[in-house]
Structures are given as C-alpha cells and as structure tokens.
Image: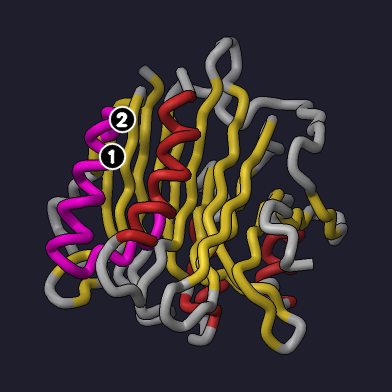
Amino acid sequence: MFKNRCYTLRYRASNEVELLLPNQQITVNKPLIDQTSFTVLVWNIFKQKKSDCITVLKQYADKTKLILLQEAQATLPLLHFISQHNKIADHVPAYCFNNIYAGVMTISDSLPTSLFSFREKEPLIRVPKSALITIYPIRDSKQQLLVANIHAVNFSIGVKIYQQQIRILLTRIKEHTGPVILAGDFNAWSRQRLNLLYHLVHSIELKPVNFSIDIRKKFMGRPLDFIFYRGLQLDAAEIISTTTSDHNPLLVNFRLD
C-alpha cells in the first residue's frame, strides 16, 4: 500500500475507514467555517505514548473547528475520540508499525472539498514523514480555506530534502486564492533550517503566529512548531502547557477578513 504515495485514510464517527486516492471526488454537505471566527489546535502528539493525551483533545474538541496532529497513531482511543465527538479525520500514514498507522492527521467538523497527500523519506533513517493539504468551504463565500498540516523531515545533512518537502506544499498553497493556514512540526532546529523556512513562507506572503508566552518545544534553542497564515485576522494565540506529549499544543483563534 505504501508504494502509492498519495493515498489518505479517512476515519468517521460511524467507525468507517475509507481509503482515498488522488483526484477522488468528495461530496460536501456543509461548510466547515460558518461564522466569522474559529479556533485551531496544532499538536505533535508523540505517538500517544504518554497517558491522558486523549483527555487533552477532549477538552478542546467542542471549542475547535480544526485539530492538526503530527505523529498521530490510529489507535483505538484516538479513533474512539473521533467517533465520540462526531469528527472527520484525514490521516496520511508515514509508516506502519505493529499494524498501526502513524503520520499527520487533520481532524475537522466537516468534509474537505479536496485533499492532497505527501510523503518524504528521511534521508538518513529512511523513515518517511507526511504532510496533508485539505480544503474546506466557507459559508456564503466563493473562497475556500486551505489547511496544510506538516511534519517536516528531521535527520538530514544540509537542507536539500527539507527544502524539497516544504516547497511541494508551498507550490500548492501559492495557487490557492482563499485564506490559508500552514502549521505543524517543522523541525526547524538549525539556523539554516529556520532561515530557509521563514524565507519560503514569506515568499508566498504567509505570516507567522507569535506567542506572548512562548513555551513551544525547542531543540538547540529553536522552536519546532509553527503556525503560518494568510487572508485571516489573528484574534488570539496561546500555548497549552502539558506533560501528555513532548510538545505543547498551539491554540489559535482566527477571524475571517
């Protein structure tokens, strides 16, 4: 299955699992954004290794329109969370271990109109990282919201593969005319990676979300998790302190322009 680089797994409240292939048509019954403001949670969930991480998700399930997870594993507790809260989850497995898929997962209240899946192998350890673009309708608007969820490659000599992975996403984002959210674990732990990341997102007019109290996970003194946006107004941004992962979740409230 993993020879097909562009498939996505979809989990629904009905406990169905659907395999989505490229260019598959999606019928959408309702817009994701039906009011002027909405909240997004972004979190590297550390493969659900630590206890009570699902409890944190439950606390914010009804407050958020979108939950962007990295290192999400399709375990029974996470699938039960999706079902219990009537969510839809699109999952791009980077790899499978003990019959459990792991990778980025975007959880929302409604279906996207389209999606694009990406995988990139780590140059040294050869274990892939994944990324996902989902596009959602906005009520009473011809524009749509593009949401990009990424877990960037980590172990590499130089930034060639790192740049390649991010450029693939940004090429799609550049073509989009509506509002954009790009978020996830960018593994921007070196000065070279961080400078490149800011250069690339600035080139397509994305702005970073800044946090007044910055307790993001850091490595070599640099934060790993980011949220960038375009075509939206930033209302509030905070970082949730938790011991249920090695990363703290980012919680951001946006308002439509």
Residue 132, position as x, y percentages in the image:
56, 49
- In the image, is residue 75 part of the stretch drawn in magenta? no
Residue 8, position as x, y percentages in the image:
71, 54
User: Amino acid type of disc 2?
Assistant: Ile
Q: Is residue 173 left or right of 236 when viewed as pictured?
A: right
Q: Which residue is mark 1?
A: 201
The reply to whether residue 140 is visible in this rendering is yes
Instruction: Determine the residue positioned at 13% across, 63% down.
Output: 191
Quadrant of the snapshot with the C terminus: top left
Element at badge 1? helix
Span colored in magenta: 184-206
Residue 252, position as x, y percentages in the image:
35, 45
Q: Is residue 85 left or right of 61 when viewed as pictured?
A: right
User: Amino acid type of disc 1?
Assistant: Val
Element at badge 2? loop
Instruction: Determine the residue positioned at 79% across, 33% down.
Output: 26
Q: Which residue is mark 2?
A: 204
- Badge 2: residue crowd in 10 Å (few <14, some 14–19, many ≥20): some
Q: How far apart are labels 2 and 1 at the CA level?
A: 6 Å
Image: 141 above or below 158: above
The reply to whether residue 234 is visible in this rendering is no
Image: 87 above or below 101: above
